[in-house]
């Protein structure tokens, strides 16, 4: 079903650990589902990755760039930055992924002030006029 011009598709889900390895089935399944459902915004819980120990090519945005057109997506992932184990996998973690026309309304993202990865936020502007005013 086609989405009306002034509407977007949003999904929220617990993904039960995306895995530290971007090639593994969980990451591929997530990306395939986003593409098949035509989702514009995806809110993610239980990502399960310690992003601070992952290399550049294994970061969440780089994984999304492998599946979706580069420059047409933006994402933010958070995790418990206080973890000292150095493990690639962690409990919890949240994230947000945006693609398509809504990507151009994204104005920033972040996580809980305690840096525990409990929640992730994103800010979107409501119109192109507002976007132009913010860039001045």
Image: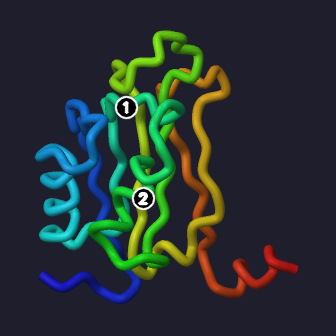
Q: What element carries label 1?
A: loop
| 113 is higher (above) or lower (below) than 120 | above
Q: Which residue is drawn at 13% across and 70% down?
A: 36
Q: Which residue is drawn at 46% across and 74% down?
A: 102
Q: Earlier in the sequence, mark 1 or mark 2?
A: 1
Q: Is mark 2 on a helix, strand or loop?
A: helix
- Classify mark 1: residues with Cα within 10 Å, few (<14), some (14-19) or many (20+): many
| 59 is higher (above) or lower (below) than 89 | below
**Nearer to the camera, 12 or 31:** 31
| 23 is higher (above) or lower (below) than 54 | below
The quarter of the picture where residue 72 lies is bottom left
Residue 62 is labelled as 2
Q: Which residue is drawn at 22% across and 59% down?
A: 31
Residue 49 is labelled as 1
Q: Residue at x 42, y 64 (%)?
A: 98
- Chosen colour scheme: rainbow
């Amino acid at each position: 079903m086609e989405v009306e011009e002034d509407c977007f598709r949003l999904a929220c889900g617990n993904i039960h650990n995306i895995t530290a390895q971007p090639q593994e089935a969980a990451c591929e399944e997530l990306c395939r589902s986003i593409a098949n459902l035509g989702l514009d915004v995806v809110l993610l819980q239980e990502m399960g990755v310690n992003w601070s120990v992952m290399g550049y090519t294994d970061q969440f945005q780089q994984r999304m760039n492998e599946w979706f057109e580069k420059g047409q997506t933006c994402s933010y992932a958070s995790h418990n930055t206080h973890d000292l184990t150095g493990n690639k996998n962690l409990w919890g973690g949240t994230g947000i992924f945006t693609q398509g026309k809504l990507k151009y309304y994204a104005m920033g993202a972040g996580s809980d002030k305690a840096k525990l990865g409990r929640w992730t936020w994103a800010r979107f502007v409501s119109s192109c006029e507002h976007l132009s005013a913010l860039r001045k």
